[in-house]
Amino acid sequence: MDDRQFRNAMGKFATGVTVVATEVAGNVHGMTANAFMSVSLNPKLVVISIAEKAQMLEKIKQSKKFSVNILAAKQQELSMIFAGQLKNQQEVPFERIEGIPVLPGAVAQITCEVSAEHVEGDHTLFIGRVTSINLEDSDPLIYFGGKYRSLADE
Ligand code: FAD
């Protein structure tokens, strides 16, 4: 099986898009991620999967905290910024919840403390214990087949 076939298969799984954010020594770092899921209700746990080559890996290892910001349909540009797909460096304003940076306008802002990390292949899974949740009532950004989409009207 080649890498392309694996990527194509994973791309058949439609997801939302998140920006994972953390702060180290006063510098906020964000990264686009769709490898995110809920793990447990009691206690409330989520998981994110971060590539070994990502700058984000060492930052979360240091801070032991992160937020997961589920992007709204109108936030595609932010997804591209935090995936390094836009050339011009842009200033992105963050707010803070319990000292953790969160993205304004996200449909959900979920703050977490790292409760465990597992190295698996070329990624590290961070299990996050959820410390706060903020919700906004708008449609999410969708990612499917390597392209951004939006929810079709019912
Ligand atoms: P960099 O590449 O250095 O940073 C990413 C970009 O964010 C840079 O352009 C940087 O300038 C900008 N940036 C960071 N912080 C700020 C800030 N405070 N203000 C303004 N700009 C800032 N990778 C994974 O490991 N796991 C995933 O689940 C995952 N899912 C993805 C889903 C999608 C839809 C896409 C498009 C990409 C996904 N990626 C995922 C790939 C990942 O987003 C990129 O490889 C990313 O560039 C890795 O970021 P980095 O931490 O190495 O930092």
Image (tube, helix red, strand yellow):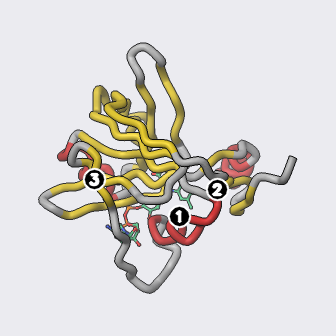
Q: Please provide percent x and percent y for residue 19.
A: 46, 55
Question: Do the CB atoms of the residues marked 3 and 1 lie less than 8 Å apart?
Answer: no
Q: Is residue 36 something that shows in the picture? A: yes
Question: Do the CB atoms of the residues marked 1 and 2 lie less than 8 Å apart?
Answer: yes
Residue flagged by tag 1: what amino acid is it? Ser
Earlier sequence position, callout 3 versus callout 1: 1
Q: Which residue is mark 2?
A: 141
Q: Is residue 1 something that shows in the picture? A: no
Q: Please provide percent x and percent y for residue 47.
A: 44, 33
Side (left or right) of 67 relative to 69 = left
**Element class at badge 3:** strand
**Element class at badge 1:** helix
Residue flagged by tag 3: what amino acid is it? Arg
Residue flagged by tag 2: what amino acid is it? Leu
Please tell me how crowded label 1 is: few (under 14), some (14-19), or many (20+) other residues with Cα within 10 Å: many
Ligand 1 shown in quarter: bottom left
Please tell me how crowded label 3 is: few (under 14), some (14-19), or many (20+) other residues with Cα within 10 Å: few
Side (left or right) of 20 relative to 9 = left
Point 35% across, 40% down: residue: 111
Image quadrant where one finds the N terminus: top right
Mark 3 vs mark 1: in front: 3
**Element class at badge 2:** strand
Marker disc for residue 96: 3
Q: Which residue is mark 1?
A: 79
Please tell me how crowded label 2 is: few (under 14), some (14-19), or many (20+) other residues with Cα within 10 Å: many
**Residues under labels 2 and 3: Cα distance?**
22 Å
Mark 2 vs mark 3: in front: 3
Mark 1 vs mark 2: in front: 2
Earlier sequence position, callout 2 versus callout 3: 3
Q: Please provide percent x and percent y for residue 43.
A: 38, 16
